Amino acid sequence: MAGYRKAFRPEVNSRLQWVQQNVWMIGASTRQPLVRLRGGAIVGEGRVEVLKNGEWGTICDDNWDLLSASVACRELGFGTAKEALSGGQLGQGMGPVHMNEVKCSGFEKSITECSFNKEVVDCSHEEDAAIRCNVPAMGFKDSCLAPTTTPRSKSPKSPFFSIL
């Protein structure tokens, strides 16, 4: 897995090497993500891209399944995967295809921890892997909409409340 950085667990010999290999924003505690989604129409879906040696690339859909998709969804901060999509269904990427024949057990913290074939043979962007994640309901959908009122119907009063 040369070229892939481990999220929060750098495997280097010294702190200086670690600082040289990881770009930090001054005053911020966030690092550049290792995985991102592109080409999706809504939050939590898209073509899966991974960062290797400073260059974003795609994942080939050979052996792509729900377990591998769930690892990517969790790494991105979503729940499990609803769908593991293949055949470039959510758009074809550009640049290199970094990973082929990805196989995850489902317990990995990063898609780059899963086993995969480093030899990307016979895989084009027509085979880019994509995901649809289960996105937790956070109430954003309702808070972004303008308040609406619905007219009340003129229904007769219930006899059960006439005593009050």
Image (cartoon, grey):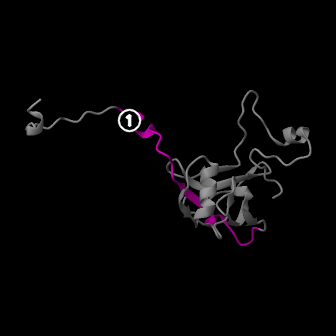
Residue 129 visible, this orientation: no
Q: Residue furthest top?
A: 27
Quarter holding the N terminus is bottom right
Q: Position of residue 158 (x, y in %)?
A: 10, 39
Residue 46 vs 64, above or below: the answer is above
Which portion, as a residue range, is magenta?
120-146
**Residue drawn 82% across and 54% down?**
3
Q: Is residue 43 left or right of residue 154?
A: right
Residue 125 visible, this orientation: yes
Q: Residue furthest front?
A: 163
**Residue drawn 25% across and 33% down?**
149
- Please tell me how crowded label 1 is: few (under 14), some (14-19), or many (20+) other residues with Cα within 10 Å: few
Amino acid at dot 1: Leu
**Residue drawn 71% across and 49% down?**
34
Q: What residue is shown with label 1? A: 145
Q: Nearer the viewer, residue 40 or 3?
A: 3
Q: Position of residue 15 (x, y in %)?
A: 89, 39
Q: Position of residue 120 (x, y in %)?
A: 75, 67
**Count of marks overlaid on the render:** 1
Residue 17 vs 97, above or below: the answer is above
Any magenta on residue 145?
yes
Q: Nearer the viewer, residue 122 or 31?
A: 31
Q: Secondary structure at mark 1?
A: loop
Q: Is residue 163 left or right of residue 116?
A: left
Q: Position of residue 51 (x, y in %)?
A: 73, 51
Q: Nearer the viewer, residue 144 or 136?
A: 136
Q: Is residue 148 left or right of residue 109?
A: left
Quarter holding the C terminus is top left
Quadrant location of residue 69?
bottom right
**Residue drawn 86% across and 41% down?**
18
Residue 160 vs 110, above or below: the answer is above
Any magenta on residue 117?
no
